[in-house]
Structure formats: structure tokens, C-alpha cells
Image: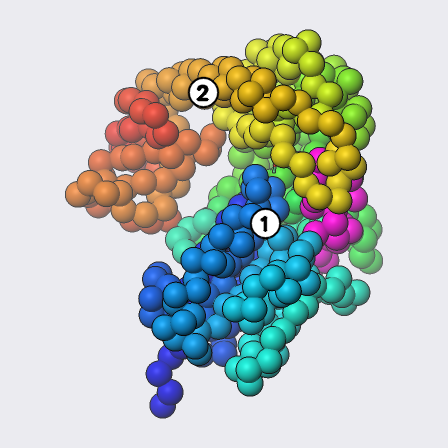
Amino acid sequence: MDKAKKLFIKTYGCQMNVYDSERMAETLGAQGYVATDTVDDADMVLINTCHIREKASEKLFSDLGRLRPAKAANPDLKIGVAGCVAQAEGAEIMRRMPLVDLVVGPQSYHRLPEMEAKIQTGERALDTEFPVEDKFEHLPARKALRGPTAFLTVQEGCDKFCAFCVVPYTRGAEVSRPPVRLLAEARDLVARGVREITLLGQNVNAYHAQDDSGVWGLARLLREMAAIEGLERLRYTTSHPNDMEDDLIAAHGDCPEVMPYLHLPVQSGSDRILKAMNRKHTAEDYLRLIDRIRAARPDILLTSDFIVGFPGETDEDFEATMALIERVNYGMAYSFKYSARPGTPAAEKPEVDSAVADARLQRLQALLSKQQKAAQEAMVGRDVTVLYEKKGRMPGQMVGKSDHLHAVHVTDPSGVPGELVRVRITASSSNSLAGERLEG
Ligand code: 5AD
Ligand code: SF4
């Protein structure tokens, strides 16, 4: 029997990319590849790229440059590039980097087996097409499970065209998967021990479908999943404020399986900048929306993304963002210094002075860290529910997530992954909480 070939995948970016990497590993697993965690003994290295990263393509080219010695030592080593940078700059990657054997865009992962066969003959393979067919249904439906939580992609792509963002160009138009399939996959996950599912999509709350039973939005999908016996928790990410429909807000209030956590990026608190970003909502619209969400679920933990130094951002615009953060009081947030993505409308505009943007980003991050710390500390002394995911680093310790997605460490020598337990929070450290298991 042939020795199994080894696959090393390096993943950058969002949960969608982490999920895609897992599925690529499974697809190639069917071709005889097993995972390895070093480049040294790999037969194939796959870099799953993210265009949202700052200087994504430069970093990719330097990663690829660093693979030269490995390829020189082992001419049979195959090197592939996947993800959004592959999609956007595939031809350029092929031209500049002869050591690359394969370039595959996010819409084409189901073609990996034939592409792999092609590169084994010494040819190079490039596929960055947007196929019309339903790409989701070509990938292995059964993914390997890692503990009691799982991701399920329900929607991909985006039609919003925010002025700074490459997603509509690299991931294509919005596509939602059929609800019957999603429900079948969710049931299958639960039958295999999953107790928490996070529904994924670039614009997940734009989910929409229609079948004989009528129209589906994300709220209906969540409610029908919540009815699956054994499925205890549901989350979804990433949402757009303009798609936060009434029934979705209501689900946070009346569907106990929908967790009190919402990632709702606003990007800026200045109406002028929001308009220039093509966000199609004002700061006030967003704040009113937050009020409605909190009315439905008062203890909901809110998170966001921010871009600092968008072209044209003045001190006043930035102060408006700081004021919005003060008003909302986030449990956590991601923040980025604006960086131009070739091909997007904002890339044509003059940039804010880099040192000014850096200074703003620091102030914004300090405020967000303060809010995050306060949100964690507010949990101390409270009783929460924790889903154990795995054993912790200390002997007898379990690690899991609370309803609010805080990582919680619990000393519980008899704890097992998949258990949902009540825990009294006793301490908060920089990135996690500690607690004691309550009886029962
Ligand atoms: N520059 C900086 N940040 C960006 N993001 C997307 N595009 C850019 C860009 N050109 C951020 C947004 C988005 C998150 C995933 O990445 O905040 O919500
Ligand atoms: Fe990009 Fe999100 Fe805007 Fe779509 S909604 S264009 S994915 S930032």
C-alpha cells in the first residue's frame, strides 16, 4: 500500500476560512492525504489566504518565497494557494511564482480532486471561476468533528459592496443553501454529538430561501434548528445591520437556544463616513437597532468590527465613532486600520495620514479593551451555563464557552467534553473567566 501523502495547510482569516480549510483537508483526505503540522514532511502545502488581512498579497508572496528551500529539497512537493487572494490574484500568483502548482478560488474547492490529479502529472492548475452550479453540494457532507461545537455554512457571498471590501468580488454574489439540506446536516451533526452549531455566512442574516413550505429567512432557519432534539445552542455570524429583521430580533428574545451574543459590525460612527463606505445606514439607525435588540434580550453581548482611517476620516468623524462605542458598550470588538484593497472604490481615494490613523486606532482599541474587560468582570459572581469543549491545560481542568461566548476554565476532574454545566464565575483574566461547577 502507498504511504499516505501528507498535507500541510496554513489558514489565514475568518471562521469561513477555517471551515473551508477543514473541508479541503477532507476532500484531499479522500485522495489519500493525511494532515501534518510541519512543512518539512509535507507532500503538499496549501496556503488558505484572506484578503481582509493587511497587505495580504505581499504577505502571501513572502510566505511563498519562504517555501523555496523546501521545494528545492523536495521537487515533488506541491504548493497550492486557496482563498480570497487566490480568487482575486490567481493569474498574477501563477506568473510571479513558478513554484506554485495550484491556485483555487473559494468557489472551486470541490474541483480539488481533479486539480490534484492534474498537478501530479507535472502540470499546473488554476481555477478561480464562479460556477453556476451549487458548489456546496460537491464537498463531502460529513465533516470530521472536533468536539461538541460545529460550524455550518448556510450562505456565502455578498451583494452589499461596502466601498472598502473585496468580499463581493472574491466570494461572489450572495447564495443561500436550501433549508432541507441544512436541517438534515444539522440533525446529522447532532446525531454525532454536536450540541452547539454556529451558522456561518459572510452576510448570514441575509439568508433567504423558498421551498414548497414557503419563505425562509434566518429566523425561521434558527427556529427549526432549535427544535432538533439535543441541539442546545445556536449562534450565527457575520450579520449586517440592514438585514436584522424583526423576526430575527424576536428570536433572540423567545428562542432559548439562540445564544445572547451578536456580532453586528458597524465599521464607523460617523454618518459621513458610513455614507462614503456605502453602508446604507446611519449611526442613529444602528443605535436604534441596538435598542430594539436589547429590548428583546437585555443581557445580549454585542460585538462589532471597526475600520479606522477610512479615506476622508476627520478627527470629528473619529470622535463620532468613539461616541458610538461609548453608547453601545461592546463586549468585544475587532478593529482594523484601513488599508486599500485593489479594485474596491475606496482604493481610489486619498488616504488618511498613516501616523494619524495609527494614533486613532490605539485610542479606539484602548476603549474597546476597557469595555471588554468590564464585560468580563461583570460576570464574576454570576452563575452561567458552560458547554465543555475540551480538557484544559491544567490537570483536572475543563474549558468551554459560556452563553456569552466567554472562554471559561473550570476545575472539574470528572468533566467531559459535550457536558452543559452550571458554573459560578469566580475570576476574570485577560482573555478568559474561571469558575466552579455548581451541583446538579
Ligand atoms: N481595510 C481595513 N479593514 C477592512 N475590513 C474589510 N476590508 C477592510 C479594509 N480594506 C474589515 C471590516 C470587516 C472585517 C472582516 O474586516 O471591518 O468587517
Ligand atoms: Fe464586505 Fe461585509 Fe460589506 Fe459585504 S457587508 S461588502 S462582506 S463588509
Q: Is residue 318 above or below residue 52?
A: above
* Element at label 1: helix
Is 73 colored magenta in this rendering? no
* Element at label 2: helix
Q: Residue 401 got which mark? A: none
Ligand 1 quarter of the rendering: top right
Identity, as a three-letter code, of the amino acid under mark 1: Ser
Q: Is residue 10 above or below residue 267?
A: below
Q: CA distance from mark 1 to mark 2?
A: 29 Å
- Number of marks present in the image shown: 2
List the residue tagged with mark 1: 57
x and y percentages locating residue 316 in the rendered image: 68, 9
Residue at image coords 48%, 72% = 78
Q: Residue 369 got which mark? A: 2
Q: Is residue 376 above or below residue 419?
A: above
> Which segment is the magenta one?
159-183
Q: Is residue 387 visible?
A: yes
Identity, as a three-letter code, of the amino acid under mark 2: Ser
